[in-house]
Image (cartoon, rainbow, N blue to C red):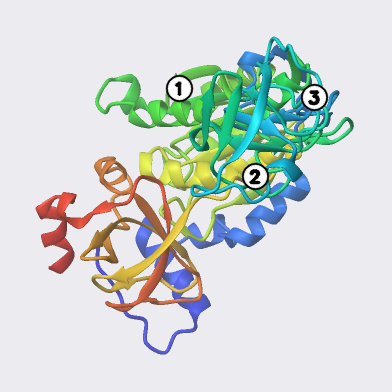
Amino acid sequence: MMMLAYKGWSPKQRVKRRVTSVIGCREVSKTMKFASVSEVLEKLVNEVSIDIEGEVVDIQDAVGRYVYRDYISRVDLPPFDRSAVDGVAARFTDVAGASETSPVLLKLVGRVDVDSSDVTSLSQFEAVLVSTGAPIPSGADVVIPIEYCLIRDNLVYLYRTYPRYSNISFRGEDLRVGDTIVRKGTKLKPWHVAALAASGYDSVEVFRKPRIAVLNTGDEILKGLVPNTTYYLITAYIKEIGGEVSYTKVVPDDIEEISEALRRALQVSDIAIITGGSSVGSRDLAPDAVLKLESSKEIFRGVRIRPGRTASAYLVNGKPVLLISGLPVAAYISLELFLTPILNKAFGSVSEVKPTISGKLVRRLSNEVGFKSFYRVIACRDRGEVVIIPLRLTGSGILSTLIKANAILEVPEDLEGYDEGSEVEVTLIGPLEECSNTSNSETRKSKE
């Protein structure tokens, strides 16, 4: 693809000319409006709303689901004052000053375990053995860890002093009756599930999984000329974010068949995703097929992103339909940008913040002003310094770049790129490793 330098052109003129040259049609800029990412996200939030009802699931099946209502603690946690360690419970005034050279001697009057006790209170100069989680007898206000105790018959020598209330977890210290455990829209983590179970819940009301249909268009897929790679990427992505694949079909390049498949898909789905056919070529029929249905409405047509600029969205009878590229990398970027906000609004949730890291760019990256670019990159440690190795921006069908990449670098719309050596922030999509573990070929390419 020829790179053109439009000297003296305004950013708007360059964007318009660039779009026309890339897609190969001078009318593209008229057909596709190419909104900015911020404009698109605002439209999605304001115009798209799906209703997902709640369902009750067993507490053991709740992790990863979005909770349908607020949940409060029914009990105090812990339910009583308890020992945080295995040790000896005593009165602080009796053990003050104990040390290795001057141990304190107390009378051992019994033992308290989580499920049994032969001592309920302590008098002066008395002590009791306690296990982790065992109730603290009345009168005791400190627990000395067992490693600082020496037991001889019914006597115990204490070789260390701890501040009053040390190693004691008090009733309600973790949660009190009425405390909020999780709020509506929270994605349940293992610790949420544990707290809910400890508070007496054996089931939880969660949002049912959103039903999402996936339609792949293209005669070439039906004829087996190209593998349907993007189908597997999208369906796996839907499952990863907590959705349910409700309907799938490969549809030929035919407006009537695409419309009918979409109509059927929306009967059993909350959202539909159509891949391929979203541009303006003679076989890009998806937009017309969507608008052929009754009560259809365009939300946006084209976005200023690379890759994935032909992404579009519509409403059909109030249900969102996303049109995204049939190329896997562009499809992934579009799902991240446009599907997640729709679901977050439905759940009353917010996007999980992915980890970021800053590093030094090993070579220059260019960007067309007016477009937000998403580069696949490798972030790795090189002798204690984080470096960022670009893979590529183009090549939306090259799935291996997503496999090799462990981070995404966003170049904002108002920048022409980043110079070599620039400090840039990337979003991690995989673990950070040493650069020595990165393939030599990728390191070599980055220096070319």
Residue type pointed to by label 1: Val
Residue 338, compared with residue 178, is above or below; it is: below
Counting residues from the N terminus, which is met first, the one under dot 1 or under dot 2?
A: 1
Quarter of the image where one finds residue 130? top right
CA separation in Å, label 1 and label 2? 27 Å
| Secondary structure found at label 1 | strand
Residue type pointed to by label 3: Pro
> Dots 3 and 1: beta carbons under 8 Å?
no
Q: Which residue is mark 2?
A: 341
Left or right: residue 331 versus residue 133 is: left
Q: Residue at x 37, y 87 (%)?
A: 7
Mark 3 is surrounded, within 10 Å at the Cα level, by few (under 14), some (14 to 19) or many (20 or more) other residues, namely some
Residue type pointed to by label 2: Pro
Q: Quadrant of the N terminus?
A: bottom left
Quarter of the image where one finds residue 200? top right
Q: Which residue is mark 1?
A: 251
Residue 435, compared with residue 181, is above or below; it is: below
- Residue 359 visible? The answer is yes
Q: Residue at x 77, y 38 (%)?
A: 173
| Secondary structure found at label 2 | helix
Q: Which dot, 3 or 1, sits closer to the camera?
A: 3
Mark 2 is surrounded, within 10 Å at the Cα level, by few (under 14), some (14 to 19) or many (20 or more) other residues, namely many
Left or right: residue 123 versus residue 234 is: right
Mark carried by residue 79 = 3
